[in-house]
Image (cartoon, helix red, strand yellow):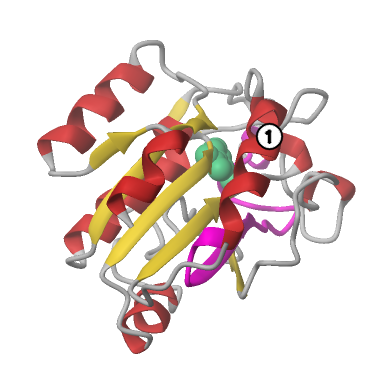
Amino acid sequence: MESNKNNNAFVIVDVQNDFCPGGKLAVSEGDKIVPIINNLSSIFFKVVATQDWHPSNHVSFAKSHPGKNEFETIELEDNVQILWPEHCVQGTEGADFHPDLDLRPVDLIIRKGTNPNLDSYSAFFENDHKTATGLGYYLKGFGIKKVFLCGLATDVCVFYSAMDSAYLGFETYVIEDASRGVDVPEGNLKNSLDKMIQSGIKIIKSDEVKIYL
Ligand code: VGL
Ligand code: ZN
């Protein structure tokens, strides 16, 4: 069933092999969200999927900083960077979308994290909070008012994308059961949900989406 309203968009964040069980930065149950997302995609006016898409020497990889360990943090010019295992390297199988993710309803694919010196958690801005990906312009260009987000990970890329979506003035919804968190450091998942609620973002379930469309 197509939505009869043309003011909503669905943003599917980083549903890629490396964030699913067996991947290099696996999120527990990351693959469980795929059928839920596939069932939702066709009800939205515009569907966007994002891909974390790093060069192999990316600043966010622990191996780019000899002597540093995975999940340690380092100070960059104006932000703190968590050092992740190497993941989502451009052109690798780990960077591909989960093979069962239905890409047919996807209108736009946004690739992010391509600058070797800067990470990009959000689908809207790189981690300098200045460099735009273009997604905000795309959605505003279509008159989108409501943005529904899901994907991996709830407390990293979904969180930063939702916060930027709200900052840009979109009515913002995160579909909790169509997302999974990494919870690094521990407690981060709960904190990020609290912060989103405080920012006016609505945390909803997939079977409630139609009420809000
Ligand atoms: C992500 C850590 C590093 C994510 C991306 O998609 O949530 N997390 N890069
Ligand atoms: Zn990444």
Where does residue 127 sit, x and y in percent of width and height? 38, 55
Where does residue 72 sit, x and y in percent of width and height? 49, 23
Depth check: give the residue in front, 41 or 26: 41
Q: Residue at x 49, y 53 (%)?
A: 119
- The quadrant of the picture occupied by the C terminus is bottom left
Q: Is residue 49 magenta?
A: yes
The answer to whether 8 appears left or right of 106 in the picture is left
Callout count: 1
Depth check: give the residue in front, 158 or 117: 158
The answer to whether 122 appears left or right of 204 in the picture is right
Q: Can residue 183 be seen in this view?
A: yes
Q: Residue furthest top?
A: 186
Q: Is 104 rendered above or below residue 23?
A: below
Q: Residue at x 29, y 51 (%)?
A: 212
Q: Does the magenta stretch include residue 51?
A: yes
Where does residue 186 sit, x and y in percent of width and height? 40, 11
Q: Which residue is drawn at 88% across and 48% down?
A: 93
Q: Can residue 113 be seen in this view?
A: no
Which stretch is magenta? 43-64
Where does residue 7 sit, x and y in percent of width and height? 33, 74
- Helix, strand or loop at mark 1: helix
Q: How dense is the environment of label 1, judged by Cα within 10 Å: few (below 14), some, or many (20 and up)?
A: many
Quarter-of-image position of residue 154? top left
Q: Which amino acid does label 1 sit on?
A: Phe
Ligand 1 falls in which quarter? Answer: top right
The residue pinned by badge 1 equals 19
Depth check: give the residue in front, 131 or 149: 149
- The quadrant of the picture occupied by the N terminus is bottom right
Depth check: give the residue in front, 114 or 109: 109
Quick check: is the Cβ at mark 1 less than 8 Å away from ligand 1?
A: yes
Q: Residue at x 75, y 37 (%)?
A: 18
